[in-house]
Image (tube, coloured by chain):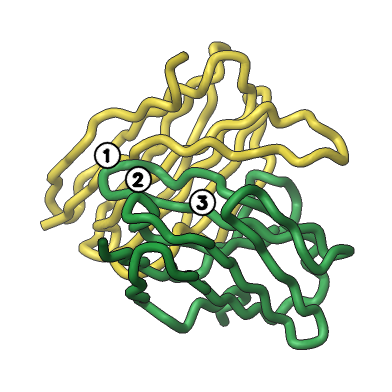
Chain colours: A yellow, B green
């Protein structure tokens, strides 16, 4: 079975540019979460989407936006890139509707974004 | 304001010995904790969890202990194997949904043959 896939693997952008990162969840999973991992830190929560609706948002500026498509894949957009946006961007998928039960998050390998 | 803290960036252990990874937290409202393992060029993978109503959870070579009064948890790996060499993250719930996790900075474990 295919796991969570992310594209591209690596990306180099210039300050001020815009970037779109893509994530395909595990088949059957309806929830996608995005995380930013800066070097030397743990992953930091950006967004969660479930059934195409935003379910949660972390402490990130409005330059960050995301959406989820009818096939449950997701895109993360970052506008007006700053040097500090250089990081590994991780996507995680889960069933998302396990009320009261543990909803394990399955992470993809990430997209390494470098802003110069 | 770090709600989940892993104060040891790295740990080196001999194969066959015990590895102990530590994690402290500040939010007493956390109702569960997770440990994730991450190999280079891969995403984090779930390892083991513990509910705040328990003080121990065991899964094979992995055991997590929770001390609520000290707001401290630890992951024990016995016996350690070279394949356990990875970065280990402690995480707690960020609130709102289970997709929102608060991670520590991680501890890089090296198990030497």
Q: Is residue B93 left or right of residue B43?
A: right
- Badge 1 and badge 3 both on one subunit: yes
Residue at the image position 68 percent from the left and 80 percent from the top? B72
Residue at the image position 12 percent from the left and 51 percent from the top? A14
Above or below, comparing residue A52 to residue A16 in the picture: above
Above or below, comparing residue A23 to residue B90 in the picture: above
User: In whole angstroms, how far apart are the C-alphas of marks 1 and 2?
Assistant: 5 Å
Which quadrant of the figure has residue B27?
bottom right
Q: Residues within 10 Å of mark 1 (few under 14, many from 20)?
A: some
User: In this rendering, which labeled residue sits more in front, label 1 or label 3?
Assistant: 3
Residue projecting furthest to the bottom: B70
User: On residue A78, which mark appears?
Assistant: 2
Quadrant housing the N terminus of chain B: bottom right
Residue of label 1: A19
* Chain of the residue displaying label 1: A
Residue at the image position 50 percent from the left and 77 percent from the top? B6
Residue of label 3: A46
Residue closest to the eye, A21 or A14: A21
**Of the residues under marks 1 and 3, which one precedes in the sequence?**
1
């Amino acid at each position: 079975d295919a796991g969570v896939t992310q594209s591209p693997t690596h990306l180099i952008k210039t300050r001020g540019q815009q970037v779109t990162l893509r994530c395909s969840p595990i088949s059957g999973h309806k929830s996608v979460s995005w995380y930013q991992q800066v070097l030397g830190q743990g992953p930091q929560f950006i967004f969660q989407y479930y059934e195409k609706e935003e379910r949660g948002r972390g402490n990130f500026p409005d330059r960050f936006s995301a959406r989820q498509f009818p096939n449950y894949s997701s895109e993360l957009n970052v506008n007006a890139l700053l040097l500090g946006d250089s990081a590994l961007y991780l996507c995680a998928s889960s069933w998302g509707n396990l009320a009261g039960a543990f909803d394990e998050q399955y992470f993809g390998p990430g997209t390494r974004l470098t802003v110069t | 304001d770090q709600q989940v803290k892993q104060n040891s960036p790295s740990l080196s252990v001999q194969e066959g010995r015990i590895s102990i990874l530590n994690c402290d937290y500040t939010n007493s409202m956390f109702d569960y904790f997770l440990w994730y393992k991450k190999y280079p060029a891969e995403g984090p993978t779930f390892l083991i969890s513990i509910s705040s109503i328990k003080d121990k959870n065991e899964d094979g070579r992995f055991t997590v202990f929770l001390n609520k009064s000290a707001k401290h948890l630890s992951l024990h790996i016995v016996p350690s194997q070279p394949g356990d060499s990875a970065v280990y993250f402690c995480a707690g719930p960020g609130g709102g949904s289970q997709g929102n996790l608060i991670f520590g900075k991680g501890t890089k474990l090296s198990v030497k043959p």
